[in-house]
Image: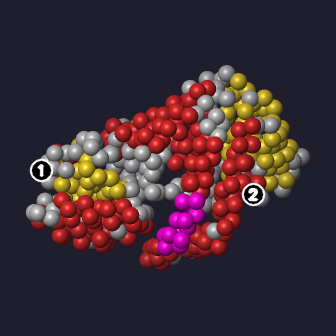
Amino acid sequence: MKYLSIIKITLLSLFLSVLNFKAVAQQKFHIDGTITGLTNGKIYTYKNNAVVPVEVKNGKFQIDGDMSEPVYNLSLLKDSEINYRDQKTFTYVLAESGAQTLKINYSDFRKSVLTGSKTQDDSYRYDAIRDKIMKKYKKEFDKVEVLHKKLDDAVAAKKDEKTTEAIKYEINDAKEFLEPAYKEITDATLKFMKDNPKSYFSMSTLLYYLNGMTYDEAKVYYDSFNPLYKNTESGKYLWAEIEKMKKGIPGVPAGPFNTTDINGKPLKLEDFKGKYVLIDFWASWCVPCRKGNPHLLKLYAEYKPKGLEILGVSDDDKNEDKWKKAVEKDGIGVWRHVLRGLQYKEGSHERINIDQDISEGYNIHSLPTKILVDPNGIIVARYDGGEADDKKMDEDLAKIFKSK
């Protein structure tokens, strides 16, 4: 099972806060805020998909907003641009209609406290459970944080690529010791959703834990949620994401694609007809992906003569040079490679040409993920990463090609 990092969950929440501002106003919220550490100045939030300033005078501020849903994901930023690495500089709160109060610590936005929102109260109850687990693994989390700081310093000092890559591998190795923590957090989260099915917080949290679930498992949670919340835009978005889980799973046809490979040659799924193809979803910046390449090379050498092909689908659309360099450095140019086809409208985070995004056709949300397709174009296995999945992949391939 794959586990989302705490920072990724926060960033997804910030993304959803942008979505909320797009809807037609039906209700309003009002927040009276106080902030320690800043007397006069500005903090920031989102409105209409743009970052907007909030004036702070004498340590006080107000935020008013329209809301079309019972709960509003309100983002709060220290700066006009998010510093993704420094979690002290941004947060989000779950506002409800009517008046609420908010206290912000300017030196650490994570310590923000919103009162007057039942949904936020649910969030605080969950945070207490999660924080207890994180405290248990404080030594391991601290080590990862130190290594991230080491990487940031190396980048700022313009250290060579060899140095920064080595630190990235250190971070990956350190994160392996956090797998038990992520597992405990996931189990605690699922229990919270099960025990609090009528909470908006539970419904909004499920989105971040779909990866690693089956469609049927996700649907059981969704069916238990409050119908009022399921009928909101966020609820509909969640359901759409659950429906996508029917793609890229064993027993269904592999998602078709028509693209151009790393050498400029046309490539379609049909080109692999009659052979088994292992589609490897990866990226140059994904350390676990890169660490797995020597093993893939071994499998390719063993099974290609018996009819196995590998196709690398890279999430490097914004940096083709790094993609090509990684293929060359890792020696994996012996099989075909393409970019996933992810595109955004210029100057925005709005996705375009989604039907051309190969990863979208296989419901890929984490890397590495591998999809095994049979000679008839039917998916026979999905491997979402981790030692158990790697072992299963080896066993499946050995069984398939045993008599060939």
Residue 180 counted in the magenta span? yes
Mark nearer the N terminus (1 vs 2): 2
Residue 237 visible in the picture: no
Residue range in magenta is 171-184
Q: Amino acid at mark 2?
A: Asp
Quarter placement of the C terminus: bottom left
Which residue shows up at 73% across the image and 33% down it? 96
Question: In this rendering, would 297 be left or right of 288?
Answer: left
Q: Secondary structure at mark 2?
A: loop
Q: Main secondary structure of the magenta part?
A: helix
For the residues labelled 1 and 2, the Cα–Cα distance comes to 57 Å
Question: In this rendering, would 377 be left or right of 111?
Answer: left
Q: Secondary structure at mark 1?
A: loop
The foreground one among 401 and 87 is 401
Q: Residue under circle 2? A: 108
Residue 328 point in image, percent of width and height: 28, 69
Residue 309 visible in the picture: yes
